[in-house]
């Protein structure tokens, strides 16, 4: 009976996660859009529920909650479903929605075209596995290892890129020494320039409008004239002289040139607007840094920047000296405590609880961090046409991210708990993934430092 | 050209509802084929014949300021709002939420205080819009062709937005890809012309009589459409913003 009980517990928690994902979708992501396709919402919530289940199973593993065979069973079921969603289902629907959005495809062609694109995608997905030494060559095609290894590569790359960028960006945005001094008069002068540019655009557009209306009026008049042959000779001459003398009908307006000037001015107005936006944002940041919250984050920023420097340093050392950590930080920390402080503690007992807390914190912060980042990203780039596609892409990234988190989490757990992950995920070359993470993290962090350095010294628009 | 006066109408709405297509259609009478994202503000100009066919006929420039609707740029948008003589609120008929957000847009433009970057969205009292001394408002629903064909007749009532009723504003539905949505003689065009006439009238013809309606005198700070500042006139002369007025 314990198997049924365990299954029930897992199912209940999955339902809770599903509802959580649904609510998040409706309240946060799609709060500006009407939901037309319930399918998209369903896919997102199911992916979220499956990912959270995997984390939950890791935690259960550490604290030894459920029966180990039922844990193993649910691991397999959850992993298979997640892989199916991420590899097969979501890309299919992404292709479907993309193709439906293209205007010149007829209704009948959508399905076959989607299948075609999907097969091409599967082919390339398979090919990714080739250049990387990630598999031992004795697995079948539909085994979990094939799927997880490829997902792992993509997911680890995404994770490392995001971590690298986040590690550099966080101190940059929260610390006060990086904030450029912008005064209120700077902001006002940029806005003044912007309004002057808008006025110039308006003047030119008015000239075009007048010229066009006069041309239309004159054409109409000419049409009238051509039909009225019995107008007097003098009236004809006087009317043509009159149209030259009329100050409003400047037929010499070069409309094409005006349009060119207008497009140049419009580009300038866009740049000025973005500059004004930057200046305003900087002012708001300066205001915010004077509040308590700002000061607190500034303080944290110092600690975090030290952590980032240490992480970059360690990644370099790992790559250069070709070493992968054999001991997880928990056991190492406890050993240091025992060695240097001379406390007599039961390492195996405490390692269980400490690693539980550590893994729990990592899981929660990574879920929260990912959801916040996804939300911000979604607001920036979505529109009413592409919102469905973007949500599906986000669901895909979320699935891959959580899947590879499980892979990398192995590093943070003591060796007795690594077994279950090794058992379920199969014979993957885990060391490769850690090395790959370090490399991409280093590259991403250095690139972000370089980019932020360049962006920091912003030249002003002349 | 100095002889032709102008009025400024601000076009507001969520990102992606079709404001740029709409302003192009109003100004040029033909659809815009490939609109891009509006960064900042794009302006169009329409030569409008005020009270055409009557003795008081005159020609005015109507400047349509189509302000980009993305959330990021909220703190910089308010530079385009001063001064405003008319407001066009645009919502997407296929997206119900863009209609609900119109209330926020209205409060953004009316309650904005340009010295405070973190303005709150206070609830605007719709009572303030009744009466002829308020800024004229027109509500336009776009993407009419995409709103479900078979339910168009039944849902005609449902498509109408609540904010139009609250403010006593006219509402029209257009399909910005078809020039005949705003062809001359169309009922939509009649409402649009009426709206522009109202804007011009309020700007140029009603300054002589500040209390044109015969209601009992209400303190001006209640009637004022910008409750933050009690002095309406000096806004137009504000030296901070260089703007030909």
Image: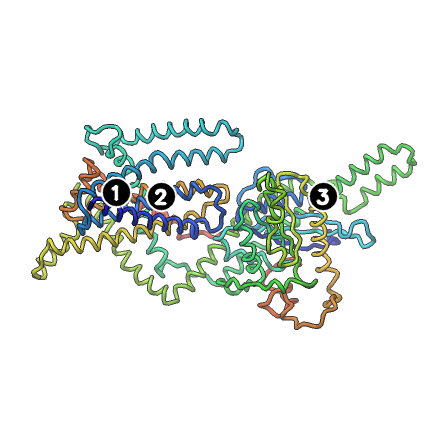
Q: B113 or B104, which lies in front?
A: B104
Residue B39 shows up from this direction = no
Residue A79 shows up from this direction = yes
In the shown orientation, is residue A328 left or right of residue A379? left
Residue A193 image point, x, y percent: 56, 55
Q: Secondary structure at mark 3?
A: loop
- Closer mark to the observer between disc 2 and disc 3: 2
In the shown orientation, is residue A410 left or right of residue B43? left
> Which chain is indicated by disc 2?
A
**Residue A46, numbered label:** 2
Q: Residues within 10 Å of mark 1 (few under 14, many from 20)?
A: many
> Which chain is indicated by disc 3?
B
Is A140 situated above or below A385?
above
- Image quadrant where one finds the N terminus of chain A: top left
Q: Secondary structure at mark 2?
A: helix
- Mark 1 = which residue? A437
Q: Residue at x 61, y 50 (%)?
A: B160
- Mark 3 = which residue? B186
């Amino acid at each position: 009976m314990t198997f049924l009980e365990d299954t029930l517990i897992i199912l209940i928690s999955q339902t809770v996660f599903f509802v959580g994902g649904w609510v998040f979708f409706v309240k946060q992501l799609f709060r500006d859009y009407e939901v037309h396709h319930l399918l998209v919402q369903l896919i997102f919530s199911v992916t979220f529920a499956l990912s959270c289940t995997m984390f939950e199973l890791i935690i259960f593993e550490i604290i030894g909650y459920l029966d180990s065979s039922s844990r193993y069973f649910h691991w397999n079921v959850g992993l298979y479903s997640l892989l199916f969603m991420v590899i097969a289902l979501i890309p299919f629907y992404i292709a479907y929605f993309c193709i439906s959005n293209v205007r010149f495809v007829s209704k009948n062609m959508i399905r076959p075209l989607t299948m075609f694109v999907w097969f091409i995608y599967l082919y390339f997905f398979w090919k990714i596995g080739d250049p990387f030494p990630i598999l031992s060559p004795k697995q079948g095609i539909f085994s979990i290892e094939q799927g997880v290894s490829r997902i792992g590569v993509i997911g680890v790359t995404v994770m490392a890129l995001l971590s690298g960028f986040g590690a550099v960006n966080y101190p940059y945005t929260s610390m006060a020494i990086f904030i450029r001094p912008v005064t209120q008069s700077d902001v006002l002068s940029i806005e003044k320039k912007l309004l002057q540019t808008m006025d110039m655009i308006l003047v030119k557009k008015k000239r075009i409008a007048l010229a066009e209306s006069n041309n239309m009026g004159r054409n109409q008049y000419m049409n009238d004239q051509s039909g009225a042959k019995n107008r007097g000779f003098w009236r004809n001459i006087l009317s043509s002289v009159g149209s030259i003398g009329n100050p409003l009908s400047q037929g010499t307006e070069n409309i094409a040139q005006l349009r060119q000037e207008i497009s140049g001015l419009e580009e300038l107005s866009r740049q000025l607007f973005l500059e004004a936006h930057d200046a305003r944002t900087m002012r708001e940041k300066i205001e915010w840094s004077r509040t308590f919250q700002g000061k607190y984050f500034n303080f944290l920023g110092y600690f975090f920047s030290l952590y980032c420097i240490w992480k970059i340093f360690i990644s370099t050392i790992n790559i250069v000296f070709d070493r992968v950590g054999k001991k997880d930080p928990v056991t190492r920390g406890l050993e240091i405590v025992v060695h240097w402080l001379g406390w007599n503690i039961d390492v195996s007992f405490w390692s269980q609880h400490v690693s539980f807390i550590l893994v729990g914190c990592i899981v929660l912060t990574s879920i929260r961090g990912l959801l916040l980042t996804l939300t911000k990203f979604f607001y920036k780039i979505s529109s009413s046409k592409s919102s469905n596609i973007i949500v599906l892409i986000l669901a895909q990234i979320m699935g891959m991210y959580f899947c590879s988190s499980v892979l990398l989490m192995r590093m943070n757990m003591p060796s007795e708990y690594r077994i279950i992950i090794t058992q379920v995920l199969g014979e993957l070359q885990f060391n490769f993934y850690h090395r790959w993470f370090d490399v991409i993290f280093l590259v991403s962090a250095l690139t972000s430092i370089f980019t932020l350095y360049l962006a920091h010294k912003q030249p002003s628009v002349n | 050209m100095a002889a032709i006066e102008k009025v400024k109408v601000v076009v507001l709405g969520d990102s992606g509802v079709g404001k740029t297509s709409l302003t192009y259609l109003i100004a040029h009478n033909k659809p815009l084929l490939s609109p891009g994202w509006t960064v900042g503000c794009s302006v169009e100009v329409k030569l409008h014949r005020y009270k055409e066919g009557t003795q008081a006929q005159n020609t005015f420039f109507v400047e349509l300021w189509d302000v980009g609707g993305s959330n990021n740029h909220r703190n910089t948008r308010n530079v385009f709002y001063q001064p405003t003589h008319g407001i066009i609120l645009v919502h997407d008929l296929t997206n119900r939420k863009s209609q609900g957000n119109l209330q926020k847009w209205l409060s953004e433009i009316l309650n904005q205080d340009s010295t405070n970057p973190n303005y709150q969205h206070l609830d605007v009292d719709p009572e303030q819009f009744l009466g002829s001394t308020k800024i004229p408002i027109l509500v336009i629903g776009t993407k009419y062709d995409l709103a479900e064909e078979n339910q168009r007749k039944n849902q005609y009532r449902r498509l109408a937005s609540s904010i139009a009723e609250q403010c006593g504003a006219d509402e029209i539905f257009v399909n910005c890809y078809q020039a005949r949505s705003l062809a001359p003689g169309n009922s939509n065009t009649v409402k649009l012309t009426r709206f522009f006439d109202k804007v011009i009238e309020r700007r140029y013809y009603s300054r002589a009589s500040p209390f044109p309606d015969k209601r009992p005198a209400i303190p001006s700070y209640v009637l004022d459409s910008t409750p933050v500042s009690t002095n309406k006139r000096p806004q137009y002369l504000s030296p901070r913003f260089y703007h030909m007025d």
